[in-house]
Amino acid sequence: MEILENLDPLLRIFWYVAIPASIIFFIQTIMTFLGSDATDGLEADFDGDLVGDEAPFQLFSLRNLINFLLGFSWTGISFYATISNKSILIILSLAVGVLFVLLFFIIIRQVQKLAEDNSFKITNTLNKSAEVYLTIPENKKGKGKILVSVKGAFHELEAMTENDRIPSGSVVKIVRIENNNILIVETI
């Protein structure tokens, strides 16, 4: 680091911040693409969520610190020769560091919009039409099976009817759920 010793103290500080922040950022990026980046590995002693419990964005995290330091240090290095007033340079560097964190927040928000909950909930079958797979006996004397499409996936579920027997291949409507797992159906 003999090269850095001959620099102006402010420029030297920018370099001392930029080098480790860039190395850590590079390691985080590699870990993200390898899939081993589940969390930052650091837990804050306080809640730094921006929006509340459902927000996936932790304001005070190692990743956000690195993003801030990258913006701060590389802006200071880039504009050091151009901006002669050191106070303005530091303020600009701080603003760009905050902008990096904000940009990361916006990117994470956009990625979160791509998430979709495709978990199956039996309540989503109510009032849907289905096809009888195994004959349903009359008057709740036994169970048959139906095929119903929920969120683009077919599910084979147990069903009963309060009316006449419903043969295989018939189309039915789901009218009620009993015991959280048996569908009550009627012919359409």
Image: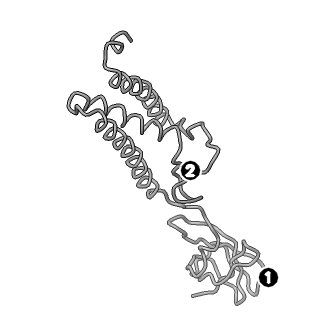
Q: Which mark is residue 48?
A: 2
What residue occupies the far top of the structure in this picture? 2
Sequence-first tag of 2 and 1: 2
What residue occupies the far right of the structure in this picture? 141
Can you give x and y, in whole percent of width and height, for residue 32 in the image?
A: 48, 37
> For the point 33% across and 12% down, which residue is it?
3
Q: Quadrant of the N terminus?
A: top left
- Does the CB distance between marks 2 and 1 fall below 8 Å? no
C-alpha distance separating marks 2 and 1: 57 Å
Label 2 sits on a secondary structure element that is: loop
Is 133 placed left or right of 143 in the picture? left
Q: Quadrant of the C terminus?
A: bottom right
Label 1 sits on a secondary structure element that is: loop
Can you give x and y, in whole percent of width and height, for residue 174 in the image?
A: 62, 81
> For the point 53% across and 44% down, which residue is it?
60
What residue occupies the far left of the structure in this picture? 82
Q: Residue beneath label 1, please?
A: 141
Residue 134, relative to residue 48: is it above or below? Answer: below
Say which quarter of the image contains residue 16.
top left
In this picture the colour scheme is one colour
Can you give x and y, in whole percent of width and height, for residue 146 in the image?
A: 63, 73
Mark 1 packing: few (<14 Cα in 10 Å), some, or many (20+)? few
Residue 42, relative to residue 176: is it above or below? Answer: above
Q: Amino acid at mark 1?
A: Lys
Which one is in front, 188 or 68?
A: 68
Residue 172, relative to residue 37: is it above or below? Answer: below
Can you give x and y, in whole percent of width and height, for residue 6 in the image?
A: 32, 13
Q: Amino acid at mark 2?
A: Gly
> For the point 43% across and 29% down, which residue is it?
21
Which one is in front, 177 or 100?
A: 100
Which one is in front, 119 or 62?
A: 62
Exactly how many numbered labels are in the figure? 2
